[in-house]
């Protein structure tokens, strides 16, 4: 699979991470869930990218 396609599939994890962060970190201002989602996405996207690459091999 082309690396660009793999990257796009890995970025598909981000909306789910954002949704979960808004449920787990309720904050009326919205700052904390966004920060948690950004941090979690920074970890989840590379993990998903590598998992897709390993599944192909």
Image (spheres, rainbow, N blue to C red):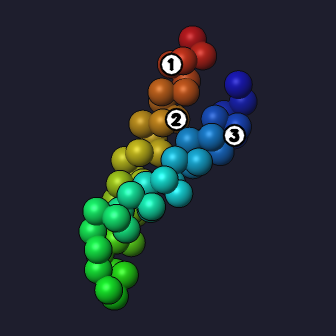
Q: Residues within 10 Å of mark 3 (few under 14, many from 20)?
A: few
Q: Quadrant of the N terminus?
A: top right
Provide the secondary structure element on which disc 2 rests: helix
For marks 2 and 3 on the same chain, the one whose residue lies earlier in the sequence: 3
Residue 12 % position (x, y): 59, 48
Q: Residues within 10 Å of mark 1 (few under 14, many from 20)?
A: few
Answer above or below: position of 11 versus 36. above
Q: Which residue is mark 1?
A: 54
Q: Nearer the viewer, residue 11 or 21?
A: 21
Q: Which residue is mark 2?
A: 49
* Residue under the image location 37 percent in, 47 percent down: 43
Q: Nearer the viewer, residue 8 or 20?
A: 20
- Say whether marks 3 and 1 touch (CB < 8 Å): no
For marks 3 and 1 on the same chain, the one whose residue lies earlier in the sequence: 3
Position of 24 with respect to 4 (left or right) is left
- Say whether marks 2 and 1 touch (CB < 8 Å): no
Q: Which mark is residue 21?
A: none
Mark 2 → mark 3, Cα distance in angstroms? 10 Å
Mark 3 → mark 1, Cα distance in angstroms? 16 Å
Answer above or below: position of 42 versus 56. below
Answer above or below: position of 12 versus 50. below
Q: Is residue 28 visible to the viewer in this orientation of the structure?
A: yes
Residue 26 % position (x, y): 29, 74
Q: Which residue is mark 3?
A: 4
* Residue under the image location 29 percent in, 80 percent down: 27
Task: Residue at the far bottom: name it.
Answer: 29
Quarter of the image for residue 4 reads top right
Provide the secondary structure element on which disc 3 rests: helix
Provide the secondary structure element on which disc 1 rests: helix
Residue 56 % position (x, y): 60, 16
* Residue under the image location 38 percent in, 58 percent down: 20
């Amino acid at each position: 699979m082309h690396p660009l396609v793999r990257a796009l599939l890995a970025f598909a994890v981000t909306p789910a991470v954002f949704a979960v962060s808004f449920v787990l970190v309720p904050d009326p201002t919205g700052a904390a869930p966004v920060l948690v989602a950004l941090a979690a996405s920074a970890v989840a996207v590379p993990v998903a990218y590598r998992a897709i690459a390993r599944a192909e091999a």
